[in-house]
Amino acid sequence: MTTTMVSSKGQIVIPKCIREKLSLEKGSEVEIIERDGVIKIIRIPEDPLEALAGCLNLGASTKELMRELDEEEKRRDERLMGLKA
């Protein structure tokens, strides 16, 4: 945990280690949310696709999902072939 001070203009300095981790540079946009006395600062991605990256967190990689889809299609095809015979 790091601490920072609020300036007379209401500005705060985000520590360098956090700016680097979140790729925050001069001009980067952030969203500020206050709720129940807690302030959250959220980086707004420049790339709209990056903004969607966490929306579909299915807990598996694309490769794993594709493999599961292929296996399911194979099982379905085997069932259909069994019905046709």
Image (cartoon, helix red, strand yellow):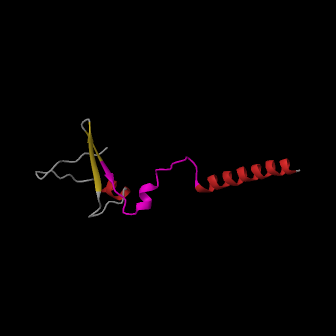
Which residue reaches farthest right? 85
The image position of residue 47, as x and y in percent, is: 40, 63
The image position of residue 33, as x and y in percent, is: 27, 45
Provide the major secondary structure of the magenta segment.
Answer: loop
Residue at (41, 56) in percent of width and height: 51
* Front in this rendered view, residue 30 or 79: 79
Q: Is residue 15 visible?
A: no
* Front in this rendered view, residue 20 or 85: 85
In this picture, is 49 found above or below 82? Answer: below
Based on the picture, tell me whether residue 36 belongs to the magenta stretch: no
Q: Quadrant of the N terminus?
A: top left
Residue at (41, 61) in percent of width and height: 48
* Front in this rendered view, residue 53 or 83: 83
The image position of residue 8, as x and y in percent, is: 10, 51
Which residue reaches farthest left? 8
In this picture, is 38 found above or below 42? Answer: above
Answer with left or right where residue 61 lies relative to residue 36.
Answer: right
Residue at (59, 56) in percent of width and height: 62
Residue at (83, 52) in percent of width and height: 81
Based on the picture, tell me whether residue 51 belongs to the magenta stretch: yes
Q: Is residue 23 visible?
A: yes
Q: In the rendered image, which quarter is residue 20 located in? A: bottom left
The image position of residue 14, as x and y in percent, is: 26, 53
Answer with left or right where residue 64 lies relative to residue 56.
Answer: right
In this picture, is 33 found above or below 17? Answer: above
Answer with left or right where residue 56 lies relative to residue 34.
Answer: right
Part of the protein shown in magenta: 41-61
